[in-house]
Image (spheres, coloured by chain):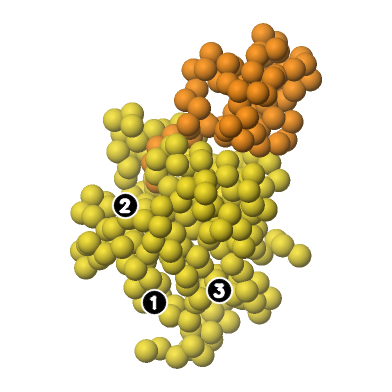
Chain colours: A orange, B yellow
């Protein structure tokens, strides 16, 4: 099972982070991704494959400050 | 100029010596001196946080006056310089360092690496995400970030959330300045208050 932002995301297994981020409609520039408690560098989204057992948090930033 | 002993006595009348000492010896960096950062900085200065490092590349502009700590007399001034005049008017005995520079992945570690606590107070979402990502991967700093404070009303939607052992996010997480709702002083200050309050909690709860 894959858990993304606290929800079961079974069909994410096998995708790269870059693919999942695009499919889910996120703007890669505006997010921070934590996979199994580790922050993933932007350059690694393409080569990081989501696999069974992963727990992922995608923090989406909005404008204003 | 007011003497340091007068300010010290005023502080001592309200807080226990160990609280004062912890705050006076704390180092905090604030990245971005807009609506969040200028107000966070002044709250930290009023609280006696002894060492502040303030980073912004921008100058004060009339569109800032609706929510940022600056006044007419600061127009055209670099925000790093303007905030210094405001801090000096509250407590001239704090150690304040400023850097008028744009933060990029290439200078994050050099700028913030020495600071155990960093407030993310940028306004553009890509810059906010970049700073949080780079701080968490390139430094050991704990980060208190602001995310979602546009519009008015719904004060209680602005919260502080712990994301992991080194990241706290303050805000409602959703109201975007790009969504047609501008930024207004009360809600920006509510979020700034959350960030400053978390910083003070982290300072005072540290053994």
Identify the residue at horizontal 51%, vertical 76% (top origin).
B95
The label nearer to you, 2 versus 3, is 3
Q: Which residue shows up at 20% across the image and 54% down it? A: B62
Counting residues from the N terminus, which is met first, the one under dot 1 or under dot 2? Answer: 2
Point 43% across, 80% down: residue: B92
Residue found farthest to the top: A11
- Depth check, front residue: B27 or B175: B27
Front label number (1 vs 2): 1
Image quadrant occupied by the C terminus of chain B: bottom right
Q: Is residue B90 left or right of residue B14?
A: left
Q: Which mark is residue B88?
A: 1
- Estimate how packed mark 1 is, as few (under 14), some (14 to 19) or many (20 or more) residues with alpha carbons within 10 Å: few
The disc numbered 1 marks a residue on which chain?
B
Q: Chain of mark 3?
A: B
Question: Residue A36, percent across and down?
Answer: 74, 31
Q: Are marks 1 and 2 on the same chain?
A: yes
Tag 2's secondary structure? loop
């Amino acid at each position: 099972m894959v858990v993304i932002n606290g929800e079961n995301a079974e069909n994410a297994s096998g995708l790269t982070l870059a693919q999942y981020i695009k499919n889910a409609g996120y703007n890669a520039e505006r997010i921070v991704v934590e996979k199994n408690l580790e922050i993933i560098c932007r350059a690694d989204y393409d080569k990081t494959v989501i696999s069974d057992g992963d727990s992922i948090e995608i923090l989406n930033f909005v404008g204003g400050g | 100029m007011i003497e340091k002993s007068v300010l010290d006595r005023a502080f001592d009348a309200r807080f226990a010596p160990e609280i004062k000492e912890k705050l006076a010896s704390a180092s905090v960096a604030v990245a971005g001196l807009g609506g969040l950062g200028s107000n966070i900085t002044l709250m930290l200065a009023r609280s006696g946080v002894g060492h502040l490092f303030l980073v912004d590349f921008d100058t004060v502009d009339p569109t800032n006056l609706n929510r940022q700590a600056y006044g007419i007399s600061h127009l055209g001034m670099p925000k790093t310089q303007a905030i210094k005049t405001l801090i000096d008017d509250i407590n001239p005995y704090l150690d304040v360092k400023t850097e008028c520079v744009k933060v990029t992945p290439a200078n994050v570690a050099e700028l913030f690496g020495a600071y155990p606590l960093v407030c993310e107070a940028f306004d553009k979402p890509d810059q906010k995400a970049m700073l949080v990502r780079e701080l968490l991967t390139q430094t050991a700093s704990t980060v208190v970030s602001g995310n979602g404070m546009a519009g008015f009303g719904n004060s209680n939607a602005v919260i502080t959330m712990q994301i992991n052992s080194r990241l706290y996010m303050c805000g409602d997480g959703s109201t975007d300045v790009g969504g047609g709702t501008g930024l207004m002083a009360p809600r920006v200050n509510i979020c700034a208050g959350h960030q400053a309050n978390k910083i003070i909690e982290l300072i005072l709860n540290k053994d």
